[in-house]
Image (spheres, rainbow, N blue to C red):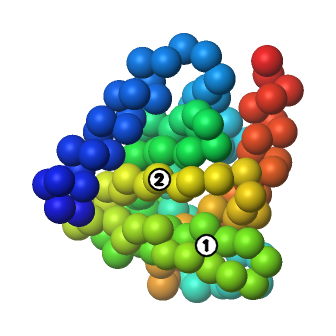
């Protein structure tokens, strides 16, 4: 990510976190409750750990950052592809850096169906967006 893009992302995150109303903040346990594996895309046997450091929705925009790690070695994974999907359409959002770090921003998040993490050699992880949003709204 270029320096300008990183600054814009940080400004967006600051504006989202500074406003107290109409936002949903996610914790790691929110994602863990709805995490699923495989669904026909078996790329390996090792599990990934998706460690969401920050995740929030405000005004339909989903912003998240965190790390992807190997459950086997606890090492950070580079090159993990992060996709958003609706029906048979898949859009690449990000590939993790060499330190396993990711930052994603998705406009109109609720219009999508799946947030997916893929890396050859690892069990594919995905989150059904409607279930994630439903679980979080039940906690209010």
Image quadrant in which the C terminus is located? top right
Q: Is residue 85 above or below residue 62?
A: below
Q: Which residue lies furthest to the top in this view?
A: 20
Comparing labels 2 and 1, the label whose residue is closer to the camera: 2
Number of numbered discs overlaid on the protein picture? 2
Q: What residue sits 61% from the left and 26% below the top?
A: 23
Q: Residue 39's quadrant in the figure?
A: bottom right
Left or right side of 100 for 48:
right
Q: What residue sits 46% from the left and 29% below the top?
A: 16
Image quadrant in which the N terminus is located? bottom left
Q: Earlier in the sequence, mark 2 or mark 1?
A: 2
Measured from the top left, where is residue 66 in percent x and y?
40, 47
SS at circle 2: strand
Left or right side of 30 for 137:
right
Measured from the top left, where is residue 106 in percent x and y?
54, 55
Q: Residue 107's quadrant in the figure?
A: bottom right
Q: Is residue 86 above or below residue 26?
A: below
Q: Which residue lies furthest to the left in this view?
A: 3
Residue 33 visible (yes or no) = yes
Q: What residue sits 64% from the left and 43% below the top?
A: 60
Specify the label residue 112 is tagged with.
none
In depth, the one of 5 and 65 nearer the eye is 5
- Which residue is disc 2 drawn over? 105
Circle 2 packing at 10 Å, graded few (<14), some (14-19), many (20+), is: some
- Which residue is disc 1 drawn over? 124
Measured from the top left, where is residue 41 in percent x and y?
68, 84
């Amino acid at each position: 990510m270029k320096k300008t893009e990183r600054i814009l992302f940080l400004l967006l995150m600051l504006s989202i976190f500074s406003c107290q109303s109409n936002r949903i903040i996610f914790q790691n346990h929110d994602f863990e409750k709805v995490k699923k594996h495989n669904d026909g895309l078996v790329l390996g046997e090792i599990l990934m750990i998706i460690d969401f450091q920050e995740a929030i929705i405000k005004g339909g925009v989903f912003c998240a950052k965190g790390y992807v790690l190997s459950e086997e070695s606890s090492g950070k994974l580079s090159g993990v592809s992060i996709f958003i999907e609706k029906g048979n359409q898949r859009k690449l959002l990000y590939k993790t850096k060499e330190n396993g770090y990711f930052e994603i921003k998705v406009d109109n998040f609720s219009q999508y169906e799946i947030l997916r993490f893929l890396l050859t050699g690892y069990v594919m992880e995905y989150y059904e967006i409607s279930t994630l949003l439903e679980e979080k709204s039940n906690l209010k």
